[in-house]
């Protein structure tokens, strides 16, 4: 797997690059063949918070994880753990589909070192996606600025609204840097 490692507001030293390569190479054991896609790793330091973002595009799935902590090495470890959980969850889903439909999976059945843990029934139930609450509301036509004001008044991180300019459903959201984002249809 080819990794593009870049730093924002941090110099990526050889030791840091080697540590990222070593930790992410643990993911190789989950694949039949090394992924040919190029992954990206972004290391960032802002206000003493060390952030690591990893994105690995694979056929049929996008692996992405992010972690923040006071230590860059701890953030890297946590991101790798998150990616391993995602892969195991995806592998369980694919294995079920293989058993049901007879399809060939992207992931190996068991890593060479046997580190893939057997999930208990409770863990398998947790991996199922569940909707625990449904909320219905009427979309009021408004512009983006009014939607941001509504979101801030409600104290939410996002707000769904009908854009008065395009008559489409849009979402405004608060970004981690304190600014706002807009999700619109293409």
Image: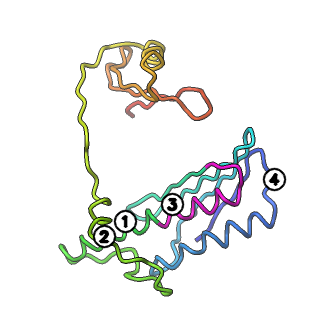
Q: Is residue 54 left or right of residue 166?
A: right
Q: CA distance from mark 1 to mark 4?
A: 34 Å
Of circles 3 and 4, the one toward us is 3
Q: Colour scheme of this structure image?
A: rainbow
Q: CA distance from mark 2 to mark 4?
A: 39 Å
Horizontal and vertical percent for residue 164? 36, 14
Q: Residue at x 46, y 85 (%)?
A: 114
Residue behind mark 3: 82
Query: Disc 3, disc 4: CB below 8 Å?
Result: no
Q: Give the answer, above or below, for where 92 lies relative to 46.
A: below
Residue 94 disc label: 2
SS category of the residue bearing label 1: helix
Horizontal and vertical percent for residue 79? 57, 59
- Judge by depth and name the residue closer to the eye, 109 or 1: 109
Magenta-highlighted residues:
68-84
Mark 4 crowdedness (10 Å alpha carbons): few <14, some 14-19, many ≥20: few
Q: Residue at x 42, y 15 (%)?
A: 150
Task: State the quadrant of the C terminus.
Answer: top left
Q: Give the answer, above or below, for where 33 lies relative to 74.
A: below
Query: Disc 1, disc 2: CB below 8 Å?
Result: yes
Q: Give the answer, above or below, for where 185 lies relative to 22.
A: above
Mark 3 crowdedness (10 Å alpha carbons): few <14, some 14-19, many ≥20: some
Q: Is residue 3 left or right of residue 139?
A: right
Residue behind mark 4: 11
- Judge by depth and name the residue closer to the eye, 173 or 6: 173
Mark 1 crowdedness (10 Å alpha carbons): few <14, some 14-19, many ≥20: some
Q: Earlier in the sequence, mark 3 or mark 2?
A: 3
């Amino acid at each position: 797997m080819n990794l593009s490692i870049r730093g924002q507001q941090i110099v990526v030293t050889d030791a840091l690059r080697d540590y990222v390569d070593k930790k992410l190479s643990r993911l190789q054991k989950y694949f039949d063949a090394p992924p040919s896609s190029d992954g990206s790793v972004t290391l960032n330091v802002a206000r003493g918070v060390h952030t690591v973002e990893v994105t690995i595009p694979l056929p049929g799935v996008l692996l992405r994880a992010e972690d923040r902590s006071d230590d860059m090495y701890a953030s890297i470890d946590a991101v790798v753990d998150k990616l391993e959980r995602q892969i195991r969850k995806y592998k369980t889903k694919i294995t079920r589909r293989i058993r049901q439909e007879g399809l060939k999976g992207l992931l190996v059945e068991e890593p060479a070192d046997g580190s893939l843990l057997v999930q208990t029934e409770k863990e398998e139930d947790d991996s199922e996606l569940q909707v625990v609450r449904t909320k219905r509301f009427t979309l009021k036509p408004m512009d983006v600025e009014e939607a941001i004001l509504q979101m801030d008044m409600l104290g939410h991180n996002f707000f769904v609204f009908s854009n008065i300019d395009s008559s489409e459903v849009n979402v405004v959201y608060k970004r981690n840097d304190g600014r706002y984002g807009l999700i619109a249809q293409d």
